């Protein structure tokens, strides 16, 4: 597990470190780390001596990092051109050092655009943690001229460091090098950051508890339920899947199958697709109604359920069953429209898994601002607190927020999971984990991790779509992978 801290928290942690280190030392440490990454990137194309790097230098300390990194690159025989976006505010010490190292300094925008066009690598040192709003001219013109690899210093300029949202013309980095701590942009907008390298500048002891955490394979492997010698099919937790429908039985089949593959033990199905579920998964015990389903340790409810009276009655039944509940799809729409159903869920171990549209419906009747497009961590955290349930907000970066304020983010490696039915697979996996005893926050985080890995494995070789059936089929291999990681780490 690793932590992610807000730019404000990082700035606060920097203060005591700055106070006890010689002036400029922290920046030099950061710049050294940046230069190492730049040299590695340059070396991938052959000898670095004689290559040409352009540093886009903004008015703040991010520009200072870029200038000092340029100084180190000059010492390694790299040609360096610094393009100053705010010539009279460029970091004075960094600028003087680069001139001394015989770096070229350009203040004319046209000259800068031409230099960018000839570069082997661009260092984006326009803005870092203090960047706000869309990039101001001439930055967009220079960014638009980039045709080579880009190393973003701290964060890609034009992408909000706190929320990962993109403002107009913004940098798409091949790699990003960051200092002291990872910031939200690095997990919320991985597509803009590329590979992220963290350089230690000694902030560790000064950082508070991480407000956002990211699970790794070892965490997930350790948390994954494994039957012991004394277990039988009941002791491991029975999951009930309440999904439908007769017209669209696919959701029920996908969710039930995913549940059967995710944990050992037992899956019960209740709903109008009992025949199809039984045909596809003979091991699933299927009935037509939740009332006849028998005892379960958790319910996964919602996919294909319908939003009419029957669906609402089914949802009320499972919310009143006194066991953890995974609510997805139609169950979310029903919750959003009924304060009575929300009251039954509040304060109980309930995990809701909305995509953006379902999230909007879920919070429609609540007081307050919930805007995932502006800040998905904040929106999910507020919704979880307001509803008293754990919210897993789906998307390229999945956010899992517990009502007590804990937040996990799972950044996807690709977007191939955006395919019909893949959410049903997630429901089955998460429901099975709830039945096995994981609390909703962990169940959501572990399910999202394995789901995304299953998409990668199910696709076979990367670079082509993966249908939801293949994602589901790859769930066991994804579990094997995380368990192997956990065993190797123990
Ligand atoms: N403290 C340290 O020792 C260490 C700090 N470190 C480094 O410092 C960075 C933080 O530096 P920082 O706080 O100086 O701000 P920074 O990110 O450079 O941006 C501020 C400047 O950008 C401008 N600007 C803002 N928005 C803009 C826009 N949309 N479009 C265009 N311009 C925009 C803004 O202009 P203004 O609004 O003032 O006119 C202001 O001049 C951090 O990311 C890390 O790289 C590391 O070296 C570790 C040690
Ligand atoms: N752009 C994306 N990149 C990566 N994963 C995504 C992206 N968009 C959606 N996903 C994931 O794909 C799944 C889609 O779920 P959902 O929208 O419920 O689909 P369905 O209802 O068709 O089953 C979720 O796990 C979500 O996190
Ligand atoms: K930057």
Image (cartoon, grey):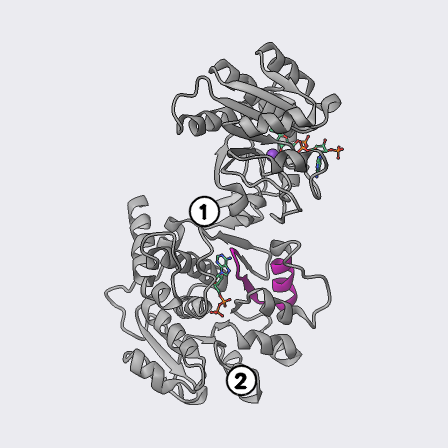
Q: Is residue 393 magenta?
A: yes
In whole angstroms, how far apart are the C-alphas of marks 2 and 1? 38 Å
Depth check: 85 or 19 in front?
85
Determine the residue positioned at 58% across, 29% down: 116
Vertical placement of 120 versus 102: above or below?
A: below
| Magenta range | 379-397
Residue under the point 64% across and 44% down: 160
Query: Quarter of the image holding residue 183?
Result: top right
Q: How dense is the environment of label 2, judged by Cα within 10 Å: few (below 14), some, or many (20 and up)?
A: many
The residue that mark 1 highlights is 1
For the C terminus, give its image quadrant.
Answer: top left
Q: Residues within 10 Å of mark 1 (few under 14, many from 20)?
A: few
Query: Residue 140, image x and y in percent?
Result: 67, 38
Q: Mark 2, mark 1: which one is toward the viewer? A: 2
Front position in the image: 49 or 281: 49
Quadrant housing residue 261 = bottom left
- Residue at image coords 71%, 44%: 133
| Position in image of residue 149 (x %, y %) | 50, 34
Q: Are marks 2 and 1 in contact (CB under 8 Å)?
A: no
Identify the element where label 2 is drawn: helix
Which quadrant holds residue 10?
A: top right
Instruction: Estimate the x, y position of residue 322 in percent, counting from the top left.
Output: 49, 78
- Can I make out residue 16 in this image? no
Mark closest to the chain's N terminus, 2 or 1: 1
Q: Nearer the viewer, residue 17 or 367?
A: 367
Q: Which residue is mark 2?
A: 311
- Residue 460 lies, with reference to residue 182, above or below; the image says below
List x then y, in percent, for residue 4: 55, 44
Furthest-right residue in view?
Answer: 88
Residue in the picture at 30% in, 78% down: 281
């Amino acid at each position: 597990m690793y932590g992610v801290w807000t730019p404000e928290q990082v700035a606060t942690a920097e203060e005591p470190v700055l106070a006890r280190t010689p002036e400029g030392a922290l920046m030099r440490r950061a710049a050294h780390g940046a230069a190492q990454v730049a040299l590695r990137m340059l070396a991938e194309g052959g000898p670095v001596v004689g290559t040409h790097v352009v540093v886009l230098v903004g008015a703040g300390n991010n520009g200072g990092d870029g200038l000092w990194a340029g100084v180190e690159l000059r010492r390694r025989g790299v040609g360096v051109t610094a393009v100053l976006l705010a010539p009279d505010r460029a970091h004075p010490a960094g600028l003087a050092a680069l001139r001394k190292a015989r770096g070229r300094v350009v203040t004319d925008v046209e000259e800068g655009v031409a230099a960018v066009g000839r570069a082997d690598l661009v260092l984006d040192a326009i803005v870092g943690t203090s960047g706000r709003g869309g990039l101001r001219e001439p930055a967009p013109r220079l960014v638009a001229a980039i045709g080579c690899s880009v190393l973003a210093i701290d964060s890609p300029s034009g992408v909000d460091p706190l929320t990962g949202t993109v403002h107009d013309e913004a940098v798409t980095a091949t790699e990003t090098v960051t200092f002291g701590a990872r910031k939200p942009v690095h997990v919320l907008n991985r597509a803009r950051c590329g590979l992220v390298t963290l350089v230690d500048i000694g902030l560790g002891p000064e950082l508070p508890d991480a407000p956002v955490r990211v699970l790794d394979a070892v965490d997930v492997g350790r948390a994954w339920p494994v039957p012991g010698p004394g277990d039988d099919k009941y002791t491991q937790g029975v999951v009930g899947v309440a999904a439908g429908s007769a017209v669209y039985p696919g959701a029920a089949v996908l969710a039930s199958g995913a549940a059967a593959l995710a944990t050992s033990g037992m899956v019960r199905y209740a709903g109008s697709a009992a025949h199809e579920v039984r045909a596809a998964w003979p091991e699933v015990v299927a009935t037509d109604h939740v009332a006849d389903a028998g005892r379960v340790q958790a319910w996964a409810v919602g996919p294909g359920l319908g939003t009419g009276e029957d669906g609402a009655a089914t949802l009320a039944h499972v919310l009143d069953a006194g066991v953890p509940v995974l609510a997805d799809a139609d169950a979310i729409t029903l919750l959003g429209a009924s304060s009575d159903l929300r009251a039954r869920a509040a304060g109980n171990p309930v995990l809701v898994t909305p995509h953006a549209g379902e999230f909007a419906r879920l919070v429609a009747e609540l007081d307050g601002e919930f805007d995932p497009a502006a800040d998905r961590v904040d929106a999910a955290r507020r919704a979880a607190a307001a509803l008293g349930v754990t919210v897993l907000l789906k998307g390229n970066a999945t956010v899992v927020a517990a009502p007590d304020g804990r937040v996990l983010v799972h950044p996807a490696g690709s977007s191939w999971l955006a395919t019909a039915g893949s959410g049903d697979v997630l429901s089955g996996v998460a429901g099975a984990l709830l039945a096995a005893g994981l609390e909703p926050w962990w169940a959501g985080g572990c399910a999202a991790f394995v789901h995304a890995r299953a998409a990668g494995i199910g696709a076979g070789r990367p670079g082509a779509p993966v249908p939801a059936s293949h994602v589901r089929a790859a769930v066991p291999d994804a579990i094997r992978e995380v368990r192997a990681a956990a065993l190797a780490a123990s």
